Amino acid sequence: MKKPVRHRKLKITLLVLAGLFLAFLCIPVPKFDKPYSTILTARDGELLGAKIADDGQWRFPATNKYSQKYVDCLLEYEDRWFYYHPGFNPISFVKALIDNIKAGEVVRGGSTLSMQVVRMSRDNPPRTYGEKLLEVALALRLELHYSKKEILDLYAANAPFGGNVVGIDAAAWRYFHTTPDDLSWSEAATLAVLPNAPSLIHPGRSRERLEQKRNTLLQRVLGSTEDAELAMMEDIPDRPFEIPMLAYHYLAEKDNKHHGEHIKTTIDANLQQSVIDIMKRHHDLNVLNSIDNAAVYVVDYLNDEILAYVGNNWDADDARMVDMVQAQRSTGSILKPFLFAAMLDEGTLLPQMVVPDVPMSISGFTPKNYSGEYWGAVTADKALQNSLNAPFVHLLREYGQPRFLTLLKNLPLRGVVFDSEHYGLSLIVGGAEASLFDITNAYAKMGRKLASYANENYDVVVDDGITPYSAEAIAETFHVMLGLTRPMSQIGWGGFNSSRQVAWKTGTSYGFKDAWAVGLTDRYAVGVWVGNSDGEGRPGLTGVGAAAPLMFDVIGKLNDNYTYPGNTSESVEIEVCAESGYPKSEYCPHTKKIRVVDVENQTGVCPYHKKVFLDESRQYRVKSDCYPVDQKRFEVFYVLPPVMEWFYKKHSPLFRPLPAFYPGCGASHPDDVMAFVYPKGDASISIPIGIRGDRQQVVFEIAHRNPQKTIFWSLNDKFLGETRLNHQMPIDVERGNYELRCVDEDGIELMRKIVVQ
């Protein structure tokens, strides 16, 4: 009868033990759900910036990389038997209990590292014997779930190091400006003793006590050795290092998606600091003109890496926290190379092709060149290099606003959000908004694609879809951008061996509110914006005057140059008219060969060189039906439309205009003889207002092939007067509808219907 009873007792005992074990397994494993700081590091691991954790602690995301020196010091100080006990040390526990009973208070803890991890996970509750027993149970559960290395990681990541510094990663940087895996013996010993009493032993306070504890630990770990003596000679940290602010705006931008994470970047810490210093020098000058803000963005486009990102002047009096790298601002002329390259790609433009540069008014839009001058006819490359507005408005009208808008969205420029009707032709001269980030990246992608075609040392395969442009169009566009005249600060740059070739472009928004500059070497793209974040315009705030000097100073810190050719193997050779840049016609007197994008040409042959019949003396033009055939002579003339000719001959003293017609030998079509400069076509015009608020005269102007001819002006059949040489007529008009009629002495007539508002 006794055996069954024993068996039942054994079974019950086993069941109870099994139940207790299962209950033990049901105890939740101690976990940490504390928020982490967001930290940003450079390509070499240097800390660029950090954002404090949501609970106000500097708690860096754990790397779990710390030196063996720290482990040796920590275990010697806190838990020598860490690798041997199951979570608590019975001997230490009993000794602590006896000492505390004798003292009548808690004078010794007896906690293992595992128990301390449990205590930290529970926010350090009051120390009682009941709490201590619970810590023992949870420490056993912790040991059952984690390896010893993982428990060490939990301790190192969550230990308090004084003030609001938590974890070895934050402590190593804040106290020693280093990483946990690069600690010296002295640093490791200091950080090992700090968590034992972080509120009493704090760098900056009780330094003698901290030094004593550190030295005692060093002697226990290293003994009486030379290493120990050298370690004890090191100074105790005086105060925590300030968290750097080298990339505040980039950190803020990345924190939105990577909050509480360690963000490893490709930023070059030395270059980032150099850019900040350069920006400070320029800010000291710009602020004298009340220009307070700026941004610089540098990309290594060969490796597709960001090297520098400074969102604003740190010395700015206003809005220095605003990230102007990401801000959407009026683009000015910075988009012109995008249109230039697009038209090269479709064959509707050649690099040296003549385009109109004359005043125009299109549905109330009257683009003007920055200088106020017009050249009449200018080659496309010169128009880009001089950032002339009128020619590029003409080109955009030829290309089509909807197509160009789609292209910009595909680059992508995320600030271009409206339809083409919203922007109109102003799209090419600053009517749209874009960010420095998107604009610089768009140019960088062009450089990356070109490198894959032209750089023999660059063997990275680049997707052709990275940018909508062909490598040849990019090469030619960048070649033109090399020829821009540099700002005053760069005068004489070509005379120095250290000077760098740069393909670059500037932009200035309407009202002098935004100054842009983007430059490319054969590896880097540098983008600069300068202005006021609140949109206040300032005289002299131009791309060339404010943004370009800053850009060139940054490029001076880059060991690079622009060496790509003006053409790639994808180009073809054609023969063009030397004067007009169009494919040669049978009448072109001079030609030259150039290389262009390998697409079907859409420009047609040169339209400006024409065969003109003259009288026997070659002084007059004649027509076939009013002059003897055997006496006619012919010559080739460079013939521009009247308005283009009107402006062109002002700047081209060698230009030979068409002769007048032979007396009594007919006249040509009015459009071939004269044309309105203003107004251009039937138009609505506004009465100008003077600086005193008084109404001004409206000035109409006509271009005539022969300025010597007299022109007679009338408005609604009321005679206004006549002009000769300078065909401008100032008129006082009220609001209303009018018919303006002009007749020259040969009877050639022009008429315009206008609405004065």
Image (cartoon, grey):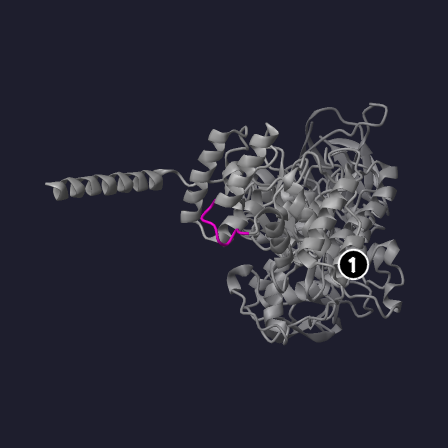
The percent coordinates of residue 544 (x first, y second) are 80, 50
Residue 557 found in image quarter: bottom right
In the depicted structure, whether residue 131 falls above or below residue 514: above
Q: Quadrant of the C terminus?
A: top right
Amino acid type indicated by mark 1 = Leu
Q: Is residue 679 visible?
A: yes
Q: Residue at x 56, y 38 (%)?
A: 96
**Relative to 526, is 655 on the left or the right?**
right
The percent coordinates of residue 617 (x first, y second) are 83, 69
Q: Nearer the viewer, residue 315 or 743?
A: 315
| Magenta highlight on residue 82 | yes
Q: Is residue 665 visible?
A: no
Q: Residue at x 59, y 70 (%)?
A: 452
In the structure shown, which secondary structural element does the residue marked by tag 1 occupy? helix
Q: Label 1: few (<14), some or many (≥20) within 10 Å?
A: few
Q: Quadrant of the N terminus?
A: top left
Q: Which residue is mark 1?
A: 230
Main secondary structure found in the magenta portion: loop
**Residue with the most extreme left position:** 1
**Magenta segment:** 81-89
The percent coordinates of residue 39 (x first, y second) are 62, 46
